[in-house]
Image (tube, rainbow, N blue to C red):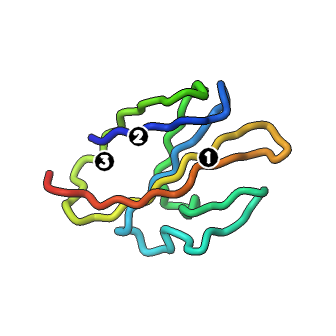
Amino acid sequence: TFGLEISGAPAGVPAWLVLRFNVFPAPNVFCPPVMGLGVSFWVNPGAPAILVPLPGLPSTCTSIPLALPAGTPPGVQGYMQVVFLVGGPPAVDATNGMAFTVGAP
């Protein structure tokens, strides 16, 4: 289990956590980011990605506990980014991307 803290989110706006692991045979992360809808996308949202809906978050710092998928082996790299559906324009906003490596189980 790990936690994610988000601050400065658009208040009360629905969001999606996009999470990918390097075990999938596809580009998992874009470097440099791909621009779309006025937002930098660092994590490839295409399948297979794990999409976690997040309720409307307050604009203050929010802590979100998240569990890794069962059986995730040590050494796997993960990439995540939170995308906010702000209703526009622009229609979306997003955090910076983040990479992490799973340690010992």
What SS does tag 2 mark?
Answer: strand
Of badges 3 and 2, nearer the viewer stands 2
Return the mark for residue 83. 1
Earlier-in-chain disc, 2 versus 1: 2
Image spot of residue 48 (x, y percent): 48, 60
- The answer to which quarter of the image holds residue 15 is top right
- The answer to which quarter of the image holds residue 5 is top left
Residue neighbourhood size for the residue with mark 2, other residues' Cα within 10 Å, grouped as few (<14), some (14–19), many (≥20): few
What SS does tag 3 mark?
Answer: loop
What SS does tag 1 mark?
Answer: strand
Question: In front here: 77 or 23?
Answer: 77
**Residue assigned mark 2:** 4
- Amino acid at the residue labelled 2: Leu
Image spot of residue 89 (x, y percent): 85, 44
Alpha-carbon distance for marks 3 and 2?
A: 16 Å
- Amino acid at the residue labelled 1: Val
- Amino acid at the residue labelled 3: Pro
**Residue assigned mark 3:** 69
96 displayed left or right of 2: right
The image shows residue 105, relative to residue 73, as above or below, that is: above
- The answer to which quarter of the image holds residue 13 is top right
10 displayed left or right of 100: right
Quadrant of the drawing holding the N terminus: top left
Question: In front here: 2 or 20?
Answer: 2
The image shows residue 36, relative to residue 84, as above or below, that is: below
Alpha-carbon distance for marks 2 and 1?
A: 14 Å
Q: Image point 57% across, 42% down: which residue?
A: 16
